[in-house]
Amino acid sequence: MSFDAILTEILEASPGCHGVALMGIDGISISQATAQRDDVDLDEVVSVMGVEFGRVLEEARKATDSVEGGSLEELYVRMGRYQLAIRGVDAETYLVMVLSVDGNAGKGRYLMRRHLLALRDEL
């Protein structure tokens, strides 16, 4: 299964999901699937959040190393307009999901976790 197919499956099965992106640690999007809305460019929203919060993910990874907490698996942020879940795929890539504030983050996070092996197989 391709990256696009996996991300589209996650997007479509996650209520309230605006988009999902597979990002490299350099901030470059490898693959992305976004919902369609006329009032907002969700491709840009997902890309920008992936880049900006990817930096937060790297800082959080350093913090977990310094406290010997084990590897960082997931980061979740709730904002006034969005929810954001980031999950490491491997040392070089991470998955970003952007949801509306009333989206089902629990299901989205579950689907991200469920598709990790398929994503790793494609890498």
Image (cartoon, rainbow, N blue to C red):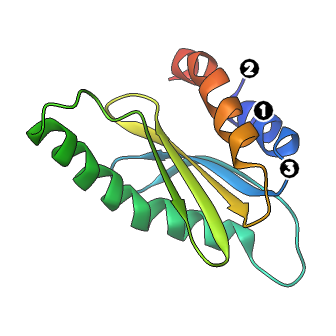
Helix, strand or loop at label 1? It is helix
- Can you say whether 57 is above or below 64 in the image? below
Name which residue type carries label 1. Answer: Ala
Left or right placement of residue 51 versus residue 31 in this view:
left
Q: Position of residue 14 (x, y in %)?
A: 81, 44
Left or right placement of residue 71 versus residue 90 in this view:
left
The reply to whether discs 2 and 3 touch (Cβ–Cβ < 8 Å) is: no
Q: Quadrant of the N terminus?
A: top right
> What is the C-alpha distance between the residues marked 2 and 3?
22 Å
Residue drawn 70% across the image and 27% down it: 2
- Can you say whether 41 is above or below 28 in the image? below
Q: Which mark is residue 115?
A: none
**Badge 3: how crowded within 10 Å, few (<14), some, or many (20+)?**
some
Residue furthest toward the bottom?
Answer: 39
Q: Which mark is residue 15?
A: 3
Residue drawn 34% across the image and 52% down it: 57
- The residue that mark 1 highlights is 5
Residue drawn 72% across the image and 56% down it: 19
The reply to whether discs 1 and 2 touch (Cβ–Cβ < 8 Å) is: yes
- The residue that mark 2 highlights is 1
Residue drawn 64% across the image and 38% down it: 109
The image quarter in which residue 110 lies: top right
